[in-house]
Image (cartoon, helix red, strand yellow):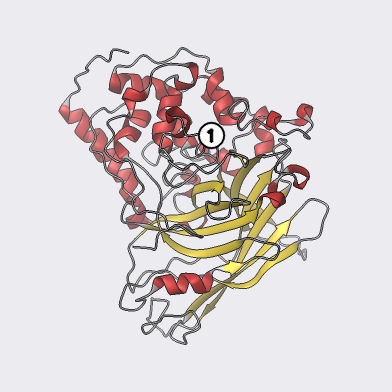
Amino acid sequence: MRVRQLSKPAAGTALACALLMGGWFAGPVSGRAGAASHVDAPSTFADPPRDGSDLYAFTSPEAPDTVTIATDYHPLQLPGNAVTLYPFMTDTRYEIHADSSGDGRPEVTYRYTFRTQDKRPSGTAAAVTAPVRSLADKAVVFRQTYTLEELRPGKPARTLVDQGAVAPSYAGSRLMPDYDALRKDATKTLPGGGRSYVGQIADSFLFNIGPYAKIRFGIPLVPEINPVSLLNANTMTLQVPKQALAFKGDPRRNPVIGIWATASRRTVDVQGGEEAAYAQVSRMGQPHVLETMFPDSLPVVGVPGGLSDQFQTRSPAQDGDWGAMIKQFREPFAPRNISFATGAAAPANPRTDLVDFFMNGVEKVTTFSVNQDVDRAAVRPAEVLRLNMSTPVSKSPHRETLFEGDPEGYPNGRRFVDDADAIQMRALMGGLLGAETGFLTRNNLIKTPPKPSTGTFPYRPLPH
């Protein structure tokens, strides 16, 4: 495909770059961030502890009978130092949901709740008062523990972890000379198989602000940098057996699951009831969906109460009836921006291929029709992160996955090496319809996450 060269006024490009970078780097300074991809929904800008930034799901490389699901919150955390602390909220339910029947409702939910023990001396900000090498050290004066429950409809909750230790925010090499030891202390083995780690990590998001600027704003000339390359986040990284996730417990016959994560805040009980009520304030599914598809999703142009805010409070079971959301996929704005920035021709609307990509899955790979035992009449369109658990672990993973012959990785789950923006750019420009799109991303300079993953659970890089 021939690409024509476009000239742009330098002043306009510089102004757009300044706005773009201002929206990103407002995070560490103002406490603002976004849901499901660091900078999208206005409702979560001022609520970073409940702000879901990334969701990952993949077959565990060293334990292929399990799936690892990582949910990251409170992004854009400053590198480790003695005066910052990023705790989980004790009035919030952080939940991972897995749908194996395709109706947009979970067959299983994993719920994390937190407790805090704060013995810091007055005026002390760090979690520790002296160098520590173990979470049992008395110098750890700010501690959090968590309960992990497995919830299934019609069955009593099952506690998988009680009083699990949270690895505290990294306070720097002087106070925490061996954070890896603290992480090992915080890693719990689950009954029936699997593991759980809760704590801080270096942000794994493979992000490139250059391609992102083309998708979001149609800006062709933005330096390629990863704004999270030196920043941290909180994570709940969970490894569970595939049998626990599959429909009827059979991952061979029913390998496809849909995964999403939510954070729900406890609300004021004006009725005086015994059971506290919780309101969902954050939802994560596929990466960068709101920023790619919803025009009201950025801090620069965000609209409080708009579609991206509404998305945070909705269930996937409602997505198929939400005409305003489906319209964003059928008539997307991003291809026009990419065309303006690159000169490539954008496919014509309506984009039924994008409706399928975001709401139904990849045919014969992540659609629920792959599952042999589901009621196909009950399957609903939904924006979730789909994973085919029967896909083997790739020996040579490629950051652009299905477009470069790698069947594993987003949109078949999501790994830390996957370049979500490059994949979505190619899908937006007709890559799923057979258009040649490799030239759009071939020369991208950022090809790996900011910090490499480890080879074993929890796979996450140690915090900066």
- The quarter of the picture where residue 264 lies is bottom right
Quarter in which the N terminus is drawn: top left
Q: Secondary structure at mark 1?
A: helix
> Does residue 306 appear in the picture of this structure?
no
Residue 149, position in %: x, y?
69, 62
Q: In which quadrant of the rendered view does residue 387 lie?
A: top right
The quadrant of the picture occupied by the C terminus is bottom left
Asked if residue 17 shows in the view, the reply is yes
Q: Position of residue 345 (x, y in %)?
A: 36, 14
Residue shown at the point (17%, 30%) measured from the top left: 11
Identify the residue shown where x is 48% and y is 36%. 290
273 or 137: nearer the viewer: 137
| Outermost residue toward the left in this view | 10
Relative horizontal placement of residue 441, taking residue 43 as reference (left or right): left
Looking at the rendered structure, the number of numbered marks drawn on it comes to: 1
Q: Give the residue drawn at x 53%, y 53%.
A: 70
Q: Nearer the viewer, residue 326 or 375?
A: 375
Q: Nearer the viewer, residue 450 or 275?
A: 450
Left or right: 84, with 277 as reference point: left
Farthest residue, direction front: 395
* 221 to 120, vertically: above or below: above
Q: Position of residue 431 (x, y in %)?
A: 44, 21
Assess disc 1: are there few (<14), some (14-19) or many (≥20) residues with their C-alpha within 10 Å of its C-alpha.
some
Q: Identify residue type, mark 1.
A: Leu
Q: Which residue is mark 1?
A: 307
Residue 362, placed above or below residue 186: above
Residue found at the far bottom of this picture: 138
